[in-house]
Amino acid sequence: MDETTGGADGGACGEVPYRTGDVLRMECPFTSATVAAVGRYHVAVRWPWWEVDTEARGIEWNGDVALPTPADHGWTDSYFRTVPPEDQLRAGDRCLVGIAPTVVHVLAVDHFDPPLETGWLPRPAAYIEFLLQGQSFDPELEEQGHTVDPAGGEPVRFALLFRPYAFLETGDDLVDHDGRAWRFDGPWDWHPYDGGPADAPAWPLHLLHRDGDPAPDEIAAVAAATATGSHADVAARWAELTHASPLPTRN
């Protein structure tokens, strides 16, 4: 199981080692913080990991992050938690804030060059977009999911639990057992070249093209990985971990 850690001391800076469809375990060590303000629906916590970006243009951040309380409808959809719980805090209290081990699945990985100006430091050069366990992607919704900077000041830790079609790379061209040619753009994002139904290829698969002619060992690896099993088996394993439906993800 591969693991990376964000934060100022290193980790997933530079190239993000995750991709659409990955199932990850995410956690962040609980860290001491001060409660700045409280309300019925939100608690403002002086964020212990970021610094104010004094050179950000037109963006002012006061150093606080608002976390929902159980009275807010978004509380069950949040992943940072406090100890004591949010609805037991008062302004000036000390608390712990962090993320308990949580299973998520990746919707997309976004890169920014130059890094985004957010009002805080470090400025993110990439975001992992993800959904929590039990949440399925809905293409009808304009906004869905969460983002986290994998190399930000927050020491968020990630462990790769499962990568569907780990033996393929985005853009691979393959032919399936039934002789249909496909392009792989993600585990739930297959495109047939014959214009027929865009469901999923029948195993075993033969690798035709990978940024040019594939090497013999690459062809052999794909053939071996798909000699038994099926696309349905991959989807079932993914759903078992995510408690979600494997639908086309965000482009």
Image (cartoon, rainbow, N blue to C red):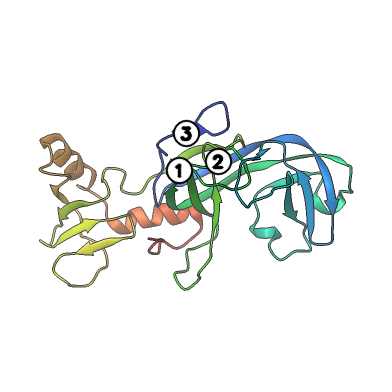
The Cα atoms of the two marked residues, 3 and 1, are separated by 14 Å
Tell me which numbered mark, 2 or 1, is placed earlier along the sequence.
Answer: 1
Residue 142 in percent (x, y) is at: 50, 69
Residue in front for this viewpoint, 15 or 84: 15
Q: What residue is drawn where x is 20% and y is 44%?
A: 222
Residue 148 in percent (x, y) is at: 55, 46
Decide: marks 2, 1 in contact (CB < 8 A)?
yes
Marks 2 and 1: which is nearer the front?
Answer: 1
Residue 211 in percent (x, y) is at: 17, 44
Label 1 secondary element: loop
Three-letter residue code for mark 3: Cys
Classed neighbour count for the residue bearing mark 1: other residues with Cα under 10 Å, few (<14), some (14–19), many (≥20): few
**In this figure, which residue is indicated by the disc labeled 3?**
13
Tell me which numbered mark, 2 or 3, is placed earlier along the sequence.
Answer: 3
The Cα atoms of the two marked residues, 2 and 1, are separated by 9 Å
Residue 242 in percent (x, y) is at: 49, 54
The Cα atoms of the two marked residues, 2 and 3, are separated by 12 Å
**In this figure, which residue is indicated by the disc labeled 1?**
114
**In this figure, which residue is indicated by the disc labeled 2?**
123
